[in-house]
Image: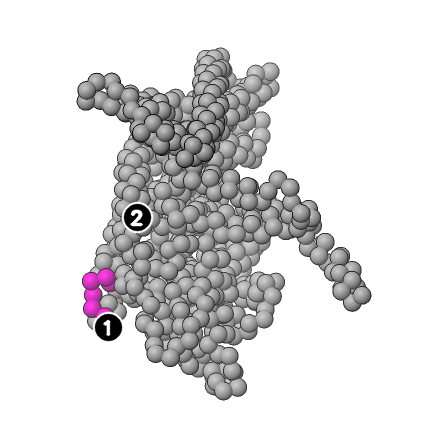
Amino acid sequence: MEQSRKDAELHLDLLLKDYEQAREADRQDGAAMTTIMGAALASCLAVLGFLTGYQGQLIGDSSIYWVIILAPVALLLPTGYATMMGANKAVCSYYLRVLESQIGNEMNKLCGGVELSYSRDLNFPVFSSTYFEVVRSAPKSGKGIARLFAFFVVLVFAGANICLLKIAYSALLQVNNGIIANLYFVLYMTVVISMGTLAYQTGVNGRSFFEQTIKDVNKRYGAGFESKCSQYEIYKAQLKHAKGNMVSRKDTLKLFPKADDLTKILVDAIGAILAGMALYINSGLVVDGIQFAHISLAILFFEGFVYQTRYILNDILGAAEERGQKSVDIRGRIVQEEDVFLAARHLFFRIVIILGAIGLAYKLGLVIIYVISLSYLVAITALYEGCRFLLRRSRDGSLLQHLCTIAMFPLVSLGMVLRLWVSFTVYYTVLKVDLYSGVIWRLLVAVVTTFDWKIIKVFIDVPVVLTYLLLWGALFGIVTVSLTWVVEALYEVDGCGVASISADWRVPGKLHVLASLRLLFWVFGVRVMRNRQPGDRLIENGLSPQQALAELITDKSNCNTFSVPSWLRRYLRMVVTPWTWGSVIGMVLSVEIASEACAVEMSRWVWGLVFIVSLPLVLCVEDLLMIKPKIRAILVIALILLPPIVISLLLCVLYFSAWIVVSEHGTLSGYFVVSFLLMFYGGPMSFMYLRKTYAETRNVLVNTVAFISNIDRQFALAVTNAVMKPKNSETKQR
């Protein structure tokens, strides 16, 4: 008993010493951060006041030029350092609260409970000072003036950064053609967004940030300070960890709920680039630096904030269903009541910011596009969620269930259509070109007054480009999402029979996901059952489509699926799958879009030839990726590139045969580049999902960044393995 009390006293003493040190460090960090932020803001205001007199003047050759260029960076450096200190302070705050709670527990063991009393009705536990600070001054949970002050500080620093960036951007535009200025703008905004993300994680999602920090600390402790492994083995382990799937179960509560979908900004870029090419070739209009910045900000805000808000709503409405999925651990979705509560708060504040951005859109002349895009997004979200609601409520095998399942495929593609429409239209609006209203009237005026063919051609060709582009986007969305659903559904599969696989499907609102899997395996004569059948053997979930097919057909000699006559039956079935005909028609549209955007005239027979050649190519690529188990990654890429390469060679032959003619203002090189990129991106590129597991399709963006950051180590590891392999073999022989 006495020894136990001594151990408790020793434990309490250690906790108190650790608490004292952590408390002191927290006070020092807080004071240092306040000093840095105050000095940075004072310097910024002084610089702004100094530079006000230079507004509108030619400063490119003056000595003040470099002061203007470096002023935003001078503000960003202390702000970034203060942000990192704020992250450390947030972690320290949670650590202090844990220490205070543990100290209170130890004192309760020794003293029977220790409480402080302010009055008869107000009692509180000892060591509660950190909780007092959090309740009153934390940005997230602070009350009254504290939260308003935190919001005011954010606005002040955001406004200061915007003012300095605008002045520096204008100065850079005076001495170059805009390339350096735009690069400066992109890099600066990248750093600002990174800082904002960190501030958001620590200020709003502080608990999740602290929990992830604990996990990282435990990994470091687990590795140990001294390791018996060689440095080579350590590097291998680090690279393996870098490739790992970094999915959190609370991705919904992050700034970017679906970070992987940020890669779809490439779709926005396609719309803006094609709009720019069409305007330049048909009318000679180009954007300047300021217009480029406005277009970039509009697209980034829509894709990175507005559209990402939709995913929060989707996750909230589907939280109850997520519990029934086996993939809940890797999907990064919310499933608990408190997470839904927090997500709903995030959704509310995001909606407030989105509505408040209408004023900024009005300032930039984009208010009509912004309001229309918001209305469109609300409409497609309502249709999508309404269809899922009907799926949940419909009877199994009913006509309503089949209709809703089919309707999910075009509905999910409308997001790509919206992205392309926004980026294309924003480009025209920023350049003060009216794309929609008054087209016929303006055309008549141009004919009667000026007979300017350039003006006429803008209003004839551009809507055609946009129409084809939107159709291409719809097909691209169907192909990509439907194949993503295939690998998602395969994660739920747990049994297989003679020519069937089964999944314990518990999510009636996502039957369209199961329908995609059924379509794929129907091609190969395999049935997909919603419930496990008697006699089915267990198989590992999370297989790729190709791996699942290989599991099913272990004895190819006794299975006629791969017999010689069966290929025709497979190909005929492939044609009706949405990803096959979507890819083929998408390749045809890619050629037509490039023709319209680059002012290249094609014979209508080119359409038919591209379709005839691309159809068997797409079918062969899909078939080989499914039935051939041993294909290296480099050969997979070569197969996916094969259709656009062959079609590009065909276009070259047709050009020399005079079936393709470049107009006076057209560009042949642009035609080939645009058509190839669109064919690759909107064609069979998505067929790579046939060789991917569901886990490999998650956090693609994070893993890509990890790969790029470790590309030197990847190269060194490959060289080391290649060089040392013979020596290792000789050693084994000896």
Residue 2 appears in which quarter of the rendering?
top left
Any part of residue 683 in sight? no
Which amino acid lies under the numbered mark 1 shown in the image of this protein?
Answer: Gly
Location of the C terminus by quadrant is: bottom right
Mark 1 secondary-structure assignment = loop
Foreground of the two, 62 or 496: 496
* Residue for point 46% across, 17% down: 31
In three-dimensional space, the C-alpha distance between marks 2 and 1, rounded to whole angstroms, equals 31 Å
Which amino acid lies under the numbered mark 2 shown in the image of this protein?
Answer: Gln
Residue 306 lies, with reference to residue 583, above or below; the image says above
> Which segment did they paint magenta?
391-397
Q: Position of residue 221 (x, y in %)?
A: 55, 41
Q: Position of residue 134 (x, y in %)?
A: 34, 26
Any part of residue 493 in sight? yes
Residue wearing tag 2:
336
* Residue for point 36% across, 50% down: 333
Residue wearing tag 1:
397
